[in-house]
Image: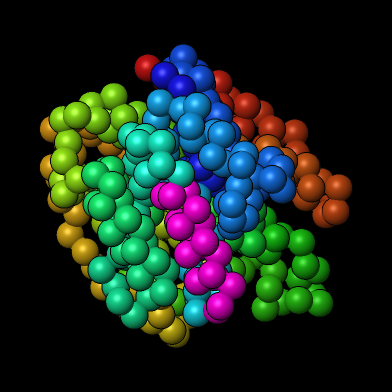
């Protein structure tokens, strides 16, 4: 099938583009990271129209979004609202013009009217319903991220954990081997590994006619964990390679979702079930990131990498042999 992925360099889009290509689909990757002509905020956009017109199916993943740090800083700005409004108006216009089947990636935050991000996703849902497309709702998908300025909590914690090894302990005692959390860590989230998410999206595409626009296609793990529990798993990942990191909870409460917890609908489990436990998924992400980051420690901090490399190599080879 000819598939266009809008937002192909994003956290989910990068995984999905690679996944669908391996499964034999012809994938058109569309993202501003690839070419400035692929900026979805440019109206009109001949490149966007061409990509949509030539495709059998569209995954609309593109959005100006990031983790809690990014949303807390930017979601109330004009640029954030304008970028997302223009992207949706642009892409939905061409989807409607060429009558394409598509999936719009929404969020479980779309019912949170106090969040500009949630409101923007709700607008996307209204567009989708008017065009009889399908809406999938993500909770918290995690995996390797390229843009660390928009990093979500798991990759953010891993990166900050490695950064905490750099300062001289005598000069920076408050920073050495310590990561200060944004919140008290008691808020709960449902985390889904990116590869499981890709399998779910392909399942929705291949069974498109089984679903109706109003069906609750909630793509998540259906298991909740606190941010403290995530920090504890990542602490164990560092200990495994001989590094100590202490995650220190802050005093603040969750200011992005205001600790609102939506219950996920299990409707989609009639077609797809998540496979990767949180600890195993985090370990995969950690190992992939650590390969490069331990070399950085070696260069800047004289960290001995040989044993660590052996541990990581063994872990990655073990995963390659998984069923």
Magenta highlight on residue 84: yes
Residue 241 horizontal/vertical position (percent): 61, 43
- The residue drawn where x is 41% and y is 42% is 97
Q: Does residue 298 appear to the left or right of 192 in the view shown?
A: right
Quadrant of the rendered image containing residue 122: bottom left
Q: Please identify the dominant SS of the magenta region.
A: helix
Front residue of 85 and 73:
85
Q: How is the image coloured?
A: rainbow
- The residue drawn where x is 41% and y is 36% is 98
Front residue of 258 and 55:
55
- The residue drawn where x is 43% and y is 50% is 93
Q: Is residue 220 visible?
A: no
The quadrant of the picture occupied by the C terminus is top left
Q: Is residue 77 visible?
A: yes
- The residue drawn where x is 71% and y is 48% is 36
The residue lying furthest to the bottom in this view is 251
Front residue of 96 and 169:
96
Q: Which residues are magenta?
A: 77-93
Residue 224 horizontal/vertical position (percent): 26, 56
Residue 182 horizontal/vertical position (percent): 50, 75
Q: Does residue 280 appear to the left or right of 209 in the view shown?
A: right
Magenta highlight on residue 156: no
Whether residue 215 is situated above or below residue 72 in the rendered picture:
above
Whether residue 238 is situated above or below residue 102 in the rendered picture:
below
Residue 132 horizontal/vertical position (percent): 24, 44
Q: Does residue 163 appear to the left or right of 282 in the view shown?
A: right
């Amino acid at each position: 099938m000819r598939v266009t992925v809008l937002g192909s360099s994003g956290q989910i889009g990068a995984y999905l583009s690679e996944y669908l290509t391996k499964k034999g689909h012809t994938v058109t990757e569309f993202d501003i990271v690839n070419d400035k002509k692929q900026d979805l905020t440019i109206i009109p956009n001949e490149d966007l129209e061409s990509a949509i017109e030539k495709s059998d199916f569209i995954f609309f993943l593109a959005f100006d979004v990031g983790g809690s740090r990014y949303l807390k800083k930017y979601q109330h700005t004009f640029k954030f609202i304008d970028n997302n409004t223009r992207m949706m108006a642009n892409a939905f216009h061409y989807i409607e013009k060429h009558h394409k089947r598509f999936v719009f990636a929404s969020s479980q935050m779309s019912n949170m009217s106090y969040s500009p991000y949630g409101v923007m996703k709700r607008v996307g849902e209204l567009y989708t319903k008017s065009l009889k497309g399908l809406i999938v709702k993500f909770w918290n998908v995690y995996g390797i991220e390229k843009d660390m300025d928009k990093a979500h909590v798991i990759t953010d914690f891993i990166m900050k954990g490695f950064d905490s090894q750099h300062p001289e302990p005598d000069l920076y005692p408050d920073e050495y081997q310590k990561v200060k959390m944004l919140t008290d860590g008691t808020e709960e989230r449902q985390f889904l590994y990116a590869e499981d998410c890709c399998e779910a999206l392909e399942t929705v595409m291949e069974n498109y006619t089984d679903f109706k626009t109003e069906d609750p296609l909630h793509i998540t793990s259906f298991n909740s964990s606190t941010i403290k529990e995530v920090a504890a798993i990542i602490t164990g990942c560092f200990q495994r390679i001989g590094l100590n990191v202490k995650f220190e909870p802050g005093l603040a409460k969750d200011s992005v979702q205001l600790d609102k917890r939506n219950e996920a609908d299990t409707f989609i489990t009639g077609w797809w079930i998540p496979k990767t436990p949180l600890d195993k998924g985090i370990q995969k992400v950690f190992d992939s990131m650590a390969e490069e980051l331990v070399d950085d420690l070696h260069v800047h901090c004289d960290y001995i990498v040989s044993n660590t490399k052996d541990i990581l190599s063994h872990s990655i080879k073990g995963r390659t042999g998984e069923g």
